[in-house]
Image (spheres, rainbow, N blue to C red):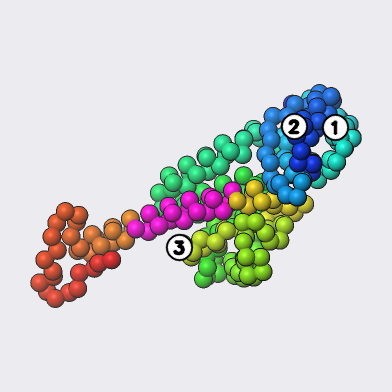
Amino acid sequence: MDRYELRVWLPDRPGALGLVASRIGSVGGDVVGIDILERDQGQAIDELVVELADPGLVPLLLSEVRQVDGITVESIRTLAGPFVDPGVGALDAAFRLVAAHDQRALFGALGEACHEGATADWSAVAPAHGDELLFGRGTPPAASWIVAFVDGARRATGDPAEHGPVDVAWAEMPAAAAVLAIGRQGRPFRSHERRRLAGLAVIAERRWSELAAGDSAGRRHSFGAPAPGTVDRGDPAGVPTVGG
């Protein structure tokens, strides 16, 4: 069975999605996944994962779906690999983030999860100050460009989770002094996708803080600070004890 990702605009009213599914079924298609990407002003944007036995049925499938009153097909594309439900994928991504054993692994897990979950063309984690990307996949822009772009877009829109240029989605991680950004052409990022990306960035930033605290504790112990449960009586040689 070939698998396709079908994005449609439809009236946000009871039964509309059922009519679309019925049309898909009429050509032998099977809807195996649904993700509601956006709802606004009486319209919804749904992403359907459809299985078809014959690729030659795609034109007929599109013709049938377009006959539903009020429906607009935004895009259709072939999917490769096994289907992963977006909700399950987000939980798996969160697990990988909290399991990261160091900051490099954390940024890698975050970038990979967002790249795969959003089927992005490129993804990157850029430092707030610096020229070298902390993570990159595809052909991302330079770190300085990403930081400048996000700063400008944030000032213009106020809320990167809901607004901004349609072909780039991002989230800032102030505690980690980093910015996450992903991009793709031809399929705009919708509000649900942006919120999912922002949620993963929050989890990653919390894990970053935990790792940073662990590193700081390790440095204190290695430089002579007392281990937990002991009393610091000062340094008889007059050298200040490392603290934090």
In primary-sequence order, the first of circles 1 and 2 is: 2
**Contact flag, marks 1 and 2 (Cβ < 8 Å):** yes
Tally of numbered tags: 3
The residue identified by callout 1 is 61
- For badge 3, the amino acid type reads Ala
- For badge 2, the amino acid type reads Val
The residue identified by callout 2 is 50
Residue at 46% of width from left, 56% of height from top? 205
Q: Quadrant of residue 51?
A: top right
Q: Residues within 10 Å of mark 1 (few under 14, many from 20)?
A: some
Question: Looking at the picture, how far across and down is residue 98, in whole percent?
Answer: 44, 46
Mark carried by residue 175: 3
Question: Looking at the picture, how far across and down is residue 172, in whole percent?
Answer: 55, 61
- 124 horizontally vs 233: left or right: right
Question: Looking at the picture, how far across and down is residue 222, in whole percent?
Answer: 24, 60
Q: Which residues are magenta?
A: 196-213
Q: Is residue 46 above or below residue 107?
A: above
Question: Looking at the picture, how far across and down is residue 45, in whole percent?
Answer: 74, 44
Q: Residues within 10 Å of mark 2 (few under 14, many from 20)?
A: many
> Magenta stretch containing residue 114, yes or no?
no
Q: Does residue 234 appear in this view?
A: yes
Q: Report the front residue among 80 and 157.
A: 157
Task: Give SS at disc 1.
Answer: helix
In primary-sequence order, the first of circles 3 and 1 is: 1
Q: Is residue 190 above or below residue 78?
A: below
